[in-house]
Image (cartoon, coloured by chain):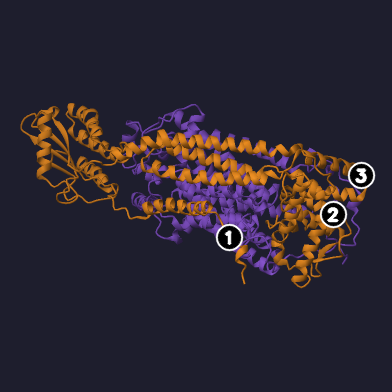
Amino acid sequence: MTDASTAPSPSNTTLDPSLLKASTIRGHWWQDRRLWHGLIAVVLFAFSTGVYFNGNETTDFHQDESRWLNRAHYFADLLDPFGPTWEDQYLTRGQPPVGSYVMGIGLLLQGRDLDTNLAWDFRRGSAFNMDNGMFPSAGDMQAGRRTNNVLGALAVVAVFLIVTNLTNTFGGLAAALLLVANPLQSWHNRLALADTTLTVTLALLLLTLVHLMRRPRWSFAILVGVLVGLGGANKFTPLALAVPLAGLGFLMLVQSWWAGRKLNDPSMRGWKGLPPLRDVSWMLMSTPFVAGFVFVAVYPYLWPDPIGRALVLLRFRQQEMASQSRVYPDRNIANTTEAFHRTWDYLTGQWSGTQRFLDQQGLPSLGDTLAGLDVWLALAGIAFLAILAARKGLRSPHLMVLAIVVVESATVVLSMRTDFERYYLPIVLGNVVTAGVFAGVIGSLVWRLVPSRVRHTRRAQPSIWTSGRPVLKEQSGD
Amino acid sequence: MIDQTSRSRLPAGQKIGIVAALVIPLLVAGFFLVIWLKPHDGVDRLAGLKLGQPGIVTSPNGLLDADDMKSLYNITNDGSLFGMPMAVRIVRVSAPMTQSETQDAAEEYFSTTSIETESGAKNGLLFYIAVPLNQPRAATAAFAPGEHFFPENGLTQERLDRTLAEVVQPHLATGNYADAAKQGAAWVVYDQLFGTLPRVPLSHGQQILNHLTNWAFAPLIGILAAGYVALAVWTRRAARRNHGRAAAPVTSVYTAAAIARGRADDALPAGAMFALFERGNLRLSANRRGIETGPEPDMDDPFACAIWERINELAERTGGIIPPGAIGRLDDALAPQLTYLRTRLADEGQFSSRIPALNRLLWGIGIAFLFVIGYLLVPALVSRAAAGFLMVIVAVAVLACITWWTFHRSRSTEAGIQEAGTWLGAVRRAALAGDADAIATLRTYRLILRQEDLIADREIVTEDYGTQAPQFLALVRGMSIA
């Protein structure tokens, strides 16, 4: 073994031109991966927006569109937070408001007003609703759908960036294309509903978490809490994500405290051996508080009694789900085992991206055969992500993404009492992310087979770790 | 024995201030907790109920066919499911009745029939249709709400009247009393569930408080927020007043990098450690998991030497090697050296010595302002004062933005920046001339200046320092393993 202190370092005698420009990292713009990632993101955004937009006119009306467009006025009603909209009533209780805000913003940005249709009454037949103004106008409906086209495309870009950060560009592209190909997500991105908002919120949450773990800072940590809170104020279940985030933060806190004890230094920064507030453990542990604050702050209905009314909301949602399972007995889910079975059946059948893609290529029989590929790739990706997380340690973005994907999917399945299609969307998001990780890792292994002189076109530099490699405890899993 | 004379004695004013600072937020928090946590025994007007009477009755039987009866049963049942006791009665009468006669008949029927959730509750609604014999086009209808029927979610007397006039009567005019009953009942349950509630009237006390909050407290908070912005602007100018002061020449890469970053933070010790590794003054332990010190650095830079000495001291305390599990806290253990550098930068005029004091001033006033905002929040919520509440949001946003700025503002003086520029120019020229030390210095400079970017973009650090460098750099900073 060559000692690092005596090893000659050829890099000491050569000058990288980029060193002369302190403000730049790279010598040539075309070597900047961030630029290429930005370009790919723009292309993906344009491509997926186009794909989603093309299907708007031919997608059938969904009765829920009437409800979400009806509530678009909630956005303007934020200026009257003590007004009638926010009193205790069915629509205000029935769904948290963020999806309605997004619809309102989308309509306003497209030059429409927020005075839309009446809310669809599912207790009455279509005739009653169609005859009495519950069907949205074509302009409002298309504007709402276009809003989700754009949000869906943003989710595609976010997924690309998440997986690129976790693995490589190939993995990112694979994940993004899998999301575009998924028929369930594509369908919902062409409807004026709130589910695309949830998808993009979760995707942005994952992306922010990756950046938080790479560059811990309070602005990212607060953004994580804000996104969890906004997700909860859209569809409730994302609030559950605050638990694993805070739990992992606590583990990191203990780890830091233990590390501090080993140094045995009383003058160390931090109180009683605990790390100072700029440690990522505190940041993650702040998530439930920030998320709770945001959840209440964006939902004026909760202001008079945040705890009591939040409990009312949860009970009401449970009643609604029970009511839905009575109204739609064929969709009723008796227990968690059945929820798992149905999830598996749908995602490896009707909502398989592989199957749809092969069907479109005129290969329906092959599509039937490979319909389960999406989920198998995702499961393999979870295994790979778990291995990466184990290797890279507690403070790795890989562990964070793994925790969020697993907890969100588990929350959806465990709380499912009726199998409405939209409930599977967060699982689809997790699946494409983990499948992308799988593709990225495999791509990386294949890339290693390429001769070294082809791979390393840039100037190779020796290491100050001149031989072997340092084995850090955090990496070895001790 | 403790030296009593060495204890600091706070003036009474400061003691009162500290007590107030602790008690005020506790009182505000306590106020909200009491309100939020006390059990709310109010009636849930959307909770399902069971009506003692059948939802639909015709007199005589057979006025409606079975399908219509079933539809009306379902509609009234929908009302019950969401907390509205409602019944429909269709009665054959011998001769046409006027609207007021129908209303009287409905109320008479209501008073003799228990359309309510429990005896004496008087909280039900009767939808009454009188159909004259052989004259269905002369049928009339009326709603008879119980004394305690309203408020019933989105259903109001105005909406009932509108349903009667715009839905029920047009159907009755065509002689189709079955559709009149179904459509009318359907709209009643629709309005009950989907109609927006009327605005809640304020009590007299609330009205006064609302007026006071919107027209006195809210503008006051606005003025205070504007004043806080003005104070922040003033601190920005005040910090520049000593910019005319000359700064000592920059002689160290760490000083130059701190000036370029605008702050002296953990990137500096981390950069120093890498430089020490490169020179062999620090190295990995034999099992390549811990850190041990090499020979004492042969360099003039006091900061790098102080870092080495500190690590050496820590290593001696832990048996000669910094154990791997403790590397993640090295940045906290090197804090005194960072403080030394900060002090030196301020003493030499490269950092503004005023900014920390000005920041503390802003934070102190900001905390006081936050208490004032907290106090406005109470009357705003109690009196439902929208303007007051929105002003609270604006004020908190202002506070958050200015606080963020105080944490991110550069502490470097213009003279310091000039000196750092002079130093950088000289080092660059030396590097171009092939001076190996200058090249290494520039690399350290870059490692510090863009450290967070470099940790996130492992390729650059890898090229300069080897494949394990990004992980190690992140670990030394207490960050993730990239």
Question: What SS does tag 3 mark?
Answer: helix
Gap in angstroms between the C-alphas marked 2 and 3: 18 Å
Q: Which residue is drawn at 86% across and 45% down?
A: A16
Q: In which quarter of the image is the C terminus of chain B?
A: bottom right
Residue A145, given in percent of the width and then of the height, sits at 49, 35
Gap in angstroms between the C-alphas marked 2 and 1: 40 Å
Question: What SS does tag 2 mark?
Answer: loop
Q: Which residue is label 2 attached to?
A: B301
Q: Which chain carries label 1?
A: A
Q: Which residue is drawn at 38% across and 52% down?
A: B36
Indicate which label's residue lies in the foreground, 1 or 3.
Answer: 3
Question: What SS does tag 1 mark?
Answer: helix
Q: Chain A is drawn in which colour?
A: purple
User: Measured along the vertical axis of the image, is residue A413 above or below residue B419?
Assistant: below
Horizontally, residue A341 falls left or right of residue A224, namely left
Crowd band around label 3 with a 10 angstrom C-alpha radius: few (<14), some (14–19), many (20+): some
Q: Which residue is label 1 attached to?
A: A248
The answer to whether residue A100 is seen in the rendering is: yes
Q: The orange chain is which one?
A: B
The reply to whether dot 1 and dot 3 touch (C-beta < 8 Å) is: no
Q: Which chain carries label 2?
A: B
Q: What residue type is labelled 1?
A: Leu
Residue A384, given in percent of the width and then of the height, sits at 65, 59
Q: Which residue is drawn at 55% across and 44% down?
A: B366
Indicate which label's residue lies in the foreground, 2 or 1.
Answer: 2
